[in-house]
Image (cartoon, rainbow, N blue to C red):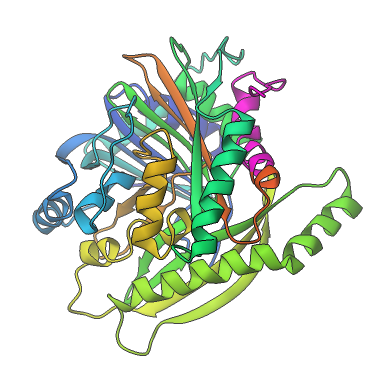
Amino acid sequence: MIFHSDNIALFKQKVLHWAANFDVACYLDSNNFADRYSKFDALIAVDVKAEVTAKAGDAFKALADFKSTHNEWMTGFLGYDLKNEIEDVNSANDDHLHLPDLYFFVPKHLIVIKNNEVEILADGADDIWNTINAFKLNSDKSPSDLLIQTRFNRAEYIDAVNRVKAHINRGDIYVTNFCQEFYAEVASINPVDIFENLNRVSPNPFACFFKYHQQYILCASPERFLAKRENKLISQPIKGTAKRGANATDDNANIQNLRSNSKEQQENVMIVDLVRNDLTHSAIAGTVRVEELFGIYSFKQVHQMISTVVCELDAHIPAVDAIRNTFPMGSMTGAPKIRAMQLMEEYERTRRGIYSGAIGYFSPDGDFDFNVVIRSILYNAVEKYLSFQAGSAITYQADAVFEYEECLLKVKAILEVLGQSQFSPQS
């Protein structure tokens, strides 16, 4: 059933708070960043009609089997450590969040927002519409009192980057994504309010609030991992970041510097080549092409260099296999992919889990769309553990100090909404 809202911003706020009262909920928000591949402004999946949970080993098969018996809307997430069932790699670092490697659910209630139209696909759509509109908002916007810690201090991070560069000099790899964790223990937050603040401070096209019982993913991602539109696959890797300027002149200068920066171009094209290779495993021969190279896109916090790689999907390749053939996304691994993942397991100090993974949906028409889980807060409310990570591309030209500063730039919005504007990492 379709309804019309005169205040869609208020309705989205109310539907988020309403959804968060259920044990499982997924709220996807494009924040009005419409592109040629967008299907809606927001999608909200609430309560569980059917679900699948799996660990790395046979997770993609479990998802494929689940999807074959449920040709319906479903939303869910893929953890980075699913890499272990695809390639000869493992995950031995500590995991403090304990999310499943894979989780998808068919919702009892699905709400799709486009322009000012609200479509409710559920029994009792009128009652749901009235309940949401009558929902009383009562939020605590005060920042949390948290002690944010880091797994690397500045000197340790710089040393690790230089050791990674030694592998590049030896020819082991030529680009990688090296990630570090920021965390807080004994953390108590209101996840809905934190997500609202994050989405306000850093509105991005692949934002997501995902509640899995007492675990939360609060995501402000600007990056699309992989989408399917009819017989077309679309991947849009991000490699290349620049800060926003203090004024229009500085901002434009930062854009031009990013556009012409040889190091940023180098890392971007390396990942584009990797993505092209990944897509060949699912494509009709000869159809993989770069639709846009080195596109510069501006968001509230940063400018990003984004490329778009597409192909025509081989009709014999099921949707889940197409995702598996490109997972994990090249922008978060490096190249060569397997060796880069092996090395990052050695140098990083935390298991990535859902960070570097993907959240998205399958629709009944056969399409799907998944983001890259970056710029995200992860929270286990039972263990009161809060975590967020940041990564930076390391190439032969990388400057370790600059890469460290780029990580801090990427978590600037997160620190702000956590009340850590004066955060100063250990020296």
Q: Is residue 387 left or right of residue 369?
A: right
Q: Position of residue 85 (x, y in %)?
A: 19, 53
Q: Quadrant of the C terminus?
A: top right
Residue 133 visible in image: no
Front residue (pair 393, 206)? 393
The number of discs equals 0
Q: In this view, does 340 lie to the left or right of 165?
A: left
Residue 424 magenta: yes
Q: In this view, does 414 lie to the left or right of 46?
A: right
Q: Is residue 366 left or right of residue 292?
A: left
Front residue (pair 220, 398)? 398
Q: Residue at x 32, y 52 (%)?
A: 361
Q: Position of residue 40 (x, y in %)?
A: 45, 55
Residue 225 visible in image: yes
Q: Which residue is drawn at 19% across and 69% down?
A: 318
Instruction: Say which quarter of the image contains residue 123.
Output: top left
Q: What stretch is highlighted in magenta?
A: 404-427
Q: Where is residue 267 in the image (x, y as percent from the top left)?
A: 58, 64
Q: Position of residue 34 (x, y in %)?
A: 56, 59
Q: Residue at x 28, y 41 (%)?
A: 91
Instruction: Say which quarter of the image contains residue 234.
Output: bottom left
Instruction: Answer above or below: position of 20 versus 344.
Output: above
Q: Which residue is drawn at 41% across and 28% down?
A: 132
Residue 220 magenta: no
Instruction: Say which quarter of the image contains residue 317.
Output: bottom left
Front residue (pair 402, 72)? 402
- Name, please, the residue furthest toward the bottom: 286
Front residue (pair 33, 164)? 164
Instruction: Answer above or below: position of 136 versus 274.
Output: above
Instruction: Answer above or below: position of 178 versus 283.
Output: above
